[in-house]
Image (tube, rainbow, N blue to C red):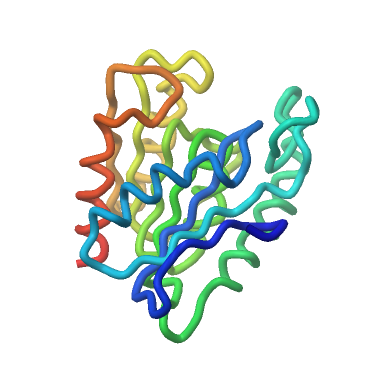
């Protein structure tokens, strides 16, 4: 791991999975999930987990922007920076079109805000929420959302609002609800594997 990301993968990957952790976590947080997803796929994935740029105010973990209280004014700049980081990952061998972006919670919000403006294979938002005044691109990649119906941190209504916004462009979008809270439970992993296979088939 360097200061910005964790990289795991074969010498000659054919596809890429990029992970964006939640508020107060760090790049290591989603690695076990990422490994489950790529190990269940016949394609040669490189796994990249990006580290949020800012220290968490409590001194442990990272944040994409201040959240308590929410610093919405910082979002446009942070979204732009993340898009640049994602574009910089692209190679001739693994372009953005062979990249799937997955984010959890605040990372899910950033995945939607940045990924929907890029020619990705798909964007996955787990327990995500839309930023105020978010206006997704009309030529966005497919989007898959997961959300616990008992989530008390980011209510289910946040993902339902995302669905309402994305349905307007009539491109692929899906929300899978589960009986749980603010988490990515094992029961949702088969659906994540299935959507990866679908997008990259």
Instruction: Indicate the position of residue 139 as horizontal and vertical percent values.
Output: 41, 64
Residue plotted at (43% across, 66% down)? 9
Task: Residue 175: give x, y in percent of width and height.
Answer: 30, 36
Q: In which quarter of the image is the N terminus?
A: bottom right
Instruction: Decide which of 129, 52 is in the foreground and name it.
Output: 52
Tell which of 148 and 50 is nearer to you. 50
Q: Which residue lies furthest to the bottom in this view?
A: 92
Is residue 139 visible in the rendered image? The answer is no
Indicate the position of residue 138 as horizontal and vertical percent values: 43, 59
Residue 169 seen in render: yes
Of 39 and 159, the residue lying toward us: 39
Rendered-image quadrant of the C terminus: bottom left
Q: Is residue 154 left or right of residue 175?
A: right
Q: How many marks?
A: 0
Along the viewing direction, whichever of 22 and 73 lies nearer the viewer: 22
Task: Give the left or right position of residue 18, taking residue 35 as reference.
Answer: right
- Residue at 49% from the left image edge and 38% from the top image edge: 104
Q: Residue at x 45, y 55 (%)?
A: 101
Give the x, y percent position of residue 73: 77, 41
Residue positioned 71% across, 51% down in the render: 78
Measured along the vertical axis of the image, is residue 11 above or below residue 69?
A: below
In this view, 82 is above or below 36: below
């Amino acid at each position: 791991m360097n200061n910005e990301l964790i990289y795991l993968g074969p010498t000659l990957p054919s596809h890429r999975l990029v992970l964006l952790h939640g508020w107060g976590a760090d790049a290591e947080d989603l690695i076990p999930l990422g490994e489950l997803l790529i190990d269940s796929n016949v394609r040669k994935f490189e796994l990249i987990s990006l580290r949020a740029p800012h220290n968490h105010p409590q001194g442990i973990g990272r944040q994409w922007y201040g959240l308590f209280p929410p610093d919405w004014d910082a979002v446009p700049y942070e979204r732009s920076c993340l898009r640049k980081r994602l574009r910089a990952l692209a190679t001739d061998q693994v372009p953005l079109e062979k990249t799937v972006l997955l984010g959890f919670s605040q990372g899910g919000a950033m995945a939607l805000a940045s990924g929907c403006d890029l020619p990705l294979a798909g964007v996955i938002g787990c327990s995500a929420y839309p930023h105020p005044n978010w206006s997704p691109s009309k030529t966005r990649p497919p989007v898959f959302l997961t959300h616990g119906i008992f989530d008390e941190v980011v209510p289910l209504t946040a993902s339902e609002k995302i669905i309402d916004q994305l349905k307007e462009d009539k491109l692929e979008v899906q929300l899978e609800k589960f009986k749980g809270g603010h988490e990515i439970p094992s029961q949702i992993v088969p659906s994540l594997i299935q959507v990866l296979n679908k997008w990259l088939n």
